[in-house]
Image (spheres, rainbow, N blue to C red):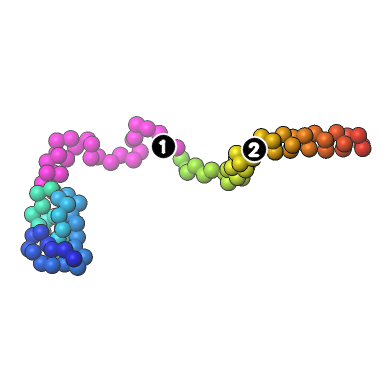
Amino acid sequence: MGTCSYCGVKETMPFKCKFCGEQFCGEHRLPENHECYGLQRFKEERSKMPEKWIYEPFHSKEKAEVGRKVEKPLNKKIYENIRGIDSRKILYAILAIIIVLTVSQVLI
């Protein structure tokens, strides 16, 4: 429960102004309707440095990488499994692979 900073009406779900940060009722929620001092300050700041507020998506100085980076789930699972194994188990796995390879070459 909040009260409108402009007219004092109690409001169950008041609106918060992004320029001044105060709470308002549905009728005074727009900055123009409650004579927002934050909006005036924003306009003054914007007029001082207009190039800061110009949106140019295709003329940016930084080249954005196209697409999104998706981590390969198999690589992540392998990495997590290897990190969880202690050195003794890794040594036994390597020895088992060597034995299997030598036995398979002997049988051929």
**Tag 1: residue type?**
Ala
Residue 75 visible within the image: no
Question: x, y percentage for residue 80?
Answer: 59, 42
User: Residue lying farthest right?
Assistant: 107
Residue 38: assigned label: none
Q: Tag on residue 64? A: 1
Q: Earlier in the sequence, mark 1 or mark 2?
A: 1
Left or right position of 83 against 62: right
Q: Which residue in the protein does label 2 denote?
A: 86
Indicate yes or no whether the magenta region holds residue 60: yes
Residue 43: horizontal and vertical position, in percent?
Answer: 13, 44
User: Which residue: 16% across, 58% down?
Assistant: 23
Tell me where the magenta segment starts and ends, as one range. Answer: 40-65
- Closer to us: 13 or 88: 88
Q: Quadrant of the N terminus?
A: bottom left
Position of 60 compared to 28: left or right?
Answer: right
